[in-house]
Amino acid sequence: MSRGLPGREMKGSANAVELTRAVLEVLEGRYAGCSALATVIGRAGSAPQVVGAKLMLRDDEVLFGTVGGGAIEAQVLDACRQTIKDGGNRRIEAHLVRDLGMCCGGSMEVFVEYLQAQPRLFVIGGGHVAQALVPLAASAGFRVKVLDDREELFDSPAFEGIETEACDVDELDAVIPDLGEHDYLLIVTRDHSRDEKALAALMRRPHHYLGMIGSRRKVHTVLARIVRREQQMGREMPDLSRVRAPVGLALGGKTPPEIAISILAELIAVRHGGAGQPLNQIEAAAAKASDPTK
């Protein structure tokens, strides 16, 4: 039996089908948080579970499955919580009598892995920058969907295997009805008016990242018009702390592939909490090497 977690819903008796459904909920993004999946990968002697037995702990402390209960499961759950906290996979080896004081005379080895859905990235516009960016973003672990009213653009090899939908910017509310706090949105349409409409429509909706391409002058002009309209309607501006415009990091590139790389760099930085600063340590390393007392 699984150990109980006081004050939390428990599903420790879940069978393999239920546990698989729970894992899929996480990986497909139907559960918005993250989880840790523990799998018994080795056993010797008398042990409470077989190789392949699984346990999944979500970040809301809901538990599915079991690796045998008792002290070994308590240790595995502690490892799961650490994995949820730091995102790192880990392996646990324990002799059930010597290490844990259990009555079983064997040993177990358990692998704990971090589970989280790939973040969704909606690319609004299917032109040159989008065609350069989308394959890169997909390879970096984003679930990409491209939206444009020009269906012929979807024949581009860049969008092979990518979800696409034909729509214009005034249809975004209907086409993306389920935006959440973990979603990424990128506006790269073919003209300023569409970019402005898309930004105005999306800035009040849930998102983790909302970016719009353009020059600094364009951004100031577009935002000034949006602010003026909001004031005329008597509404306060929404939180813009997760809105980026111009989009991307300042890498200096000008071509669509270079712009795409700068955008992807920013997406990755936002996803992982990076600062986007150079990692270069040559000067510090050289100084330390020349004077080891420093």
Image (cartoon, helix red, strand yellow):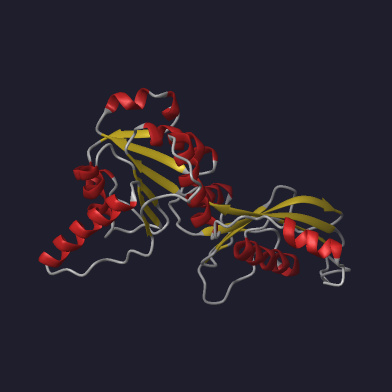
Question: Would you place residue 148 above or below residue 290 in this image?
Answer: above
Nearest the eye: 287 or 6: 287
Nearest the eye: 200 or 217: 217
Q: How many marks?
A: 0
Nearest the eye: 202 or 250: 250
For the N terminus, the image quarter is: bottom right
Question: Would you place residue 294 above or below residue 115 in this image?
Answer: below
Q: In this rendering, does residue 21 appear at all?
A: no
For the C terminus, the image quarter is: bottom right
Residue at the image point whose x is 27% and y is 54% from the top: 202
Q: Position of residue 249 (x, y in %)?
A: 48, 51
**Left or right, residue 195 beside residue 268:** left
Q: Position of residue 125 (x, y in %)?
A: 32, 38
Residue at the image point whose x is 53% and y is 43% from the top: 141
Residue at the image point whose x is 74% and y is 62% from the top: 284
Nearest the eye: 279 or 106: 279
Residue at the image point whose x is 37% and y is 51% from the top: 246
Q: Position of residue 220 (x, y in %)?
A: 27, 56
**Left or right, residue 198 beside residue 210:** left
Question: Would you place residue 100 above or below residue 45 in this image?
Answer: below
Q: In this rendering, does residue 162 appear at all?
A: yes
Question: Would you place residue 67 above or below residue 256 in this image?
Answer: below
Q: Position of residue 265 (x, y in %)?
A: 52, 48
In the rendered image, which quarter is residue 274 located in? bottom right
**Left or right, residue 188 beside residue 255:** left
Q: Spot the residue most to the bottom.
A: 6
